Amino acid sequence: MSLKPGRTILSSTISKTYVEEIKNKVEALKGIRPDGPLLVGFLANDDPAAEMYANWTAKTCESMGFRYELRTVPEKDFLEEAIIEANRDDAVDGIMVYFPVFGNAQDQYLQQVVSREKDVEGLNHVYYQNMYHNVRYLDDKQQQKSILPCTPLAVVKILEYLKVYNNLLPEGNRLYGKKCVVVNRSEIVGRPLAALLANDGAIVYSVDVNNVQKFTRGEGLKFKKHHVEDLGAYSNELLQQCSADADVIITGVPSETYRFPTEFIKEGAVCINFSSSKNFDDEVKTKASLYVPSTGKVTISMLLRNMLRLIDNRQK
């Protein structure tokens, strides 16, 4: 695969590398799921972006042999009961919720209501704890793989596809020597992503409106899991300093007006945006060697892979 400087790589191209694998696994499940595994999505807000994502998920599911059912809950307060009902239903293989619902701590509670065995988004506290502690399995025999949150996982898979990961190094250390900037520290994507990249050996500068933090496994990767150091309050100067020799810049700012300053990008860096808003100007390609404007289709592929993994875990 020849990757030319300044090239835009679409998530649809990257996701194709997983389609065959996913379809084959669905085919292998015909014995227990003749009509295909069932994913249920819960929509309890009137966000048009969530509805669009739901339609998109439905089409992707159907194209790969899954069944998808969108359950709209007009009264938010009944969402918890609806999730519990799906948890108990043996016909349901995976559950996802379109957040935000309440837009506060209640949403974090709802994430934990989804049964761990059906949580395709990987938001359960057990999965999160494993991810932050760099624990990759749920059991001592290492047969049941832990699930990772799908958008952070999608970014990791994109970096693997772009050959940012060094396959000559041992698994778990393949980002050693790389520097990454992640502009977003949400609990759903930004912070988990910084932890995943640091756990794989990178030095990661995690940026949000308040401050900048450095995620690293220490000098010579001496720690098993990442440690976090505060570098101080956010400023353009500090962002420029962190970006000056960054191999990878990842943005996820949910704002139509935010743009990552093109002049801060190192010549030849890889730039990835996971926000639904455009976080880079078109000039990004004058500096970046590779630019991925969105992660959507890879995220859905990871969600479906997670679901297949959950079904697999239940068989063990």
Image (cartoon, helix red, strand yellow):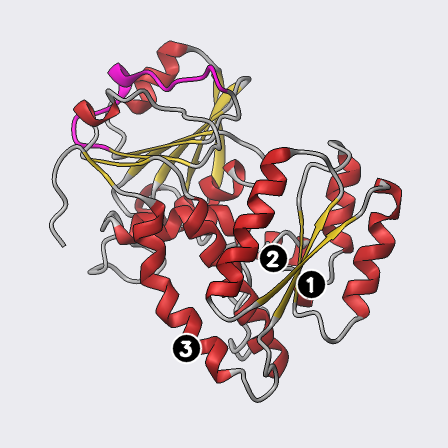
Which residue was labeled with disc 1?
116
Earlier in the chain: of badge 1 and badge 2, it is 1
Residue 4 shown left or right of residue 314 in the figure? left
Identity of the residue drawn at 73% across and 37% down: 45
Identity of the residue drawn at 41% across and 77% down: 24
Q: Main secondary structure of the magenta part?
A: loop
Which residue was labeled with disc 3?
24
Image mark for residue 127: 2
Q: Which segment did they paint magenta?
A: 256-269
Q: Is residue 261 magenta?
A: yes
Image mark for residue 313: none
Residue situated in front as seen by the camera: 51 or 115 = 51
Residue situated in front as seen by the camera: 228 or 13 = 13
Looking at the picture, which amino acid does disc 3 mark?
Answer: Asn
Residue situated in front as seen by the camera: 36 or 168 = 36
Earlier in the chain: of badge 2 and badge 3, it is 3
Disc 1 + disc 2, Cβ < 8 Å:
yes
Residue 16 shown left or right of residue 52 in the figure? left
Instruction: Give coordinates of residue 12: x percent, y percent.
Output: 35, 50
In the rendered image of this protein, does residue 96 appear above or below residue 274? below
Instruction: Give coordinates of residue 221: x percent, y percent.
Output: 35, 48
Give the class, few, some or many, for how many residues have Cα within 10 Å of label 2's Cα (few <14, many ≥20). Answer: many
Earlier in the chain: of badge 1 and badge 3, it is 3
In the rendered image of this protein, does residue 262 appear above or below residue 297? above
Residue situated in front as seen by the camera: 91 or 231 = 91
In the rendered image of this protein, does residue 160 appear above or below residue 50? below
Q: Secondary structure at mark 3?
A: helix
Instruction: Give coordinates of residue 153: x percent, y percent.
Output: 45, 51
Instruction: Give coordinates of residue 102: x percent, y percent.
Output: 78, 34
Give the class, few, some or many, for how many residues have Cα within 10 Å of label 3's Cα (few <14, many ≥20). Answer: few
